[in-house]
Amino acid sequence: MWYPRQVRQGSSPAGASAPVTPTKAGELNRTSEVNPGAREPLAGDRPQRTKPLKVITPAEAAEWVDKECKVQFTVKSSFDGFDWAFVLNSEKDHADPKNFQVLIEKETAVPQYKSKGIRNLDEYFKKGTLIFVTGRIQKYVNKRTGSESYEIRVRNADQIELP
């Protein structure tokens, strides 16, 4: 239950020089301080945009490295073998040079899907599903083979839209 704490006029708590305002449960909030309970923004958090992003295909990804855009493709395969990410591929063979990958991070995005009631990403993003993925395109170079591909890392479940 919220109730304001009574603060004597002209007084401030031990050494506080900033104005004090009542908050809930008797806590005091110094208005000049940063909210200590606020979380740091995640890399996947996006500020509100004024204009829509360009929608591109996986074939155009090379032209958009380090730029934010929206990639549209049909899921042709997926992989859940990494301990840190669930992977969606635009090609049946993940080693295909034309393949575009979406890496859904298990630490940040997967819990958001679970909170929405989506328990199995393999069933949710089944083969043949059209998706729109928003994010910054990164170039990936395979250390063993030297092959290059392009990807977007998903840290926020809202980065992927289904039509």
Image: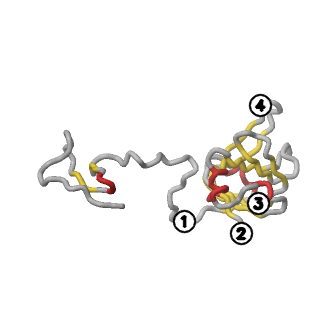
Outermost residue on the front side: it is: 1
Q: Earlier in the sequence, mark 3 or mark 1?
A: 1
Which of the labelled discs sits on residue 124, or is there none? 3
Q: Amino acid at mark 4?
A: Lys
Q: Nearer the viewer, mark 4 or mark 2?
A: 2
- Tell me the residue at 34%/47% (across/down): 34
Looking at the image, tell me whether mark 1 or mark 2 is earlier in sequence order.
Answer: 1
Q: Are marks 2 and 3 in contact (CB under 8 Å)?
A: no
Cα separation, mark 3 vs mark 1, equals 29 Å
- Of the image marks 1 and 4, the number of the one nearer the N terminus: 1
Which residue type carries mark 1? Answer: Lys
Q: Quadrant of the N terminus?
A: bottom left
Q: Residues within 10 Å of mark 2 (few under 14, many from 20)?
A: few
Q: Nearer the viewer, mark 1 or mark 2?
A: 2
Q: Tell me the kind of residue under disc 2.
A: Pro
Residue placed under numbered mark 1 in the picture: 51
Coordinates of residue 125 in the picture (x, y in percent): 77, 58
Q: Looking at the rendering, which quadrant does residue 107 occupy?
A: top right
Q: CA distance from mark 1 to mark 2?
A: 19 Å
Cα separation between marks 4 and 2:
35 Å
Q: Residues within 10 Å of mark 1 (few under 14, many from 20)?
A: few
**Which of the two discs, 2 and 3, sits closer to the camera?**
3
- Tag 4 residue: 143
Is 41 placed left or right of 85 in the picture?
left
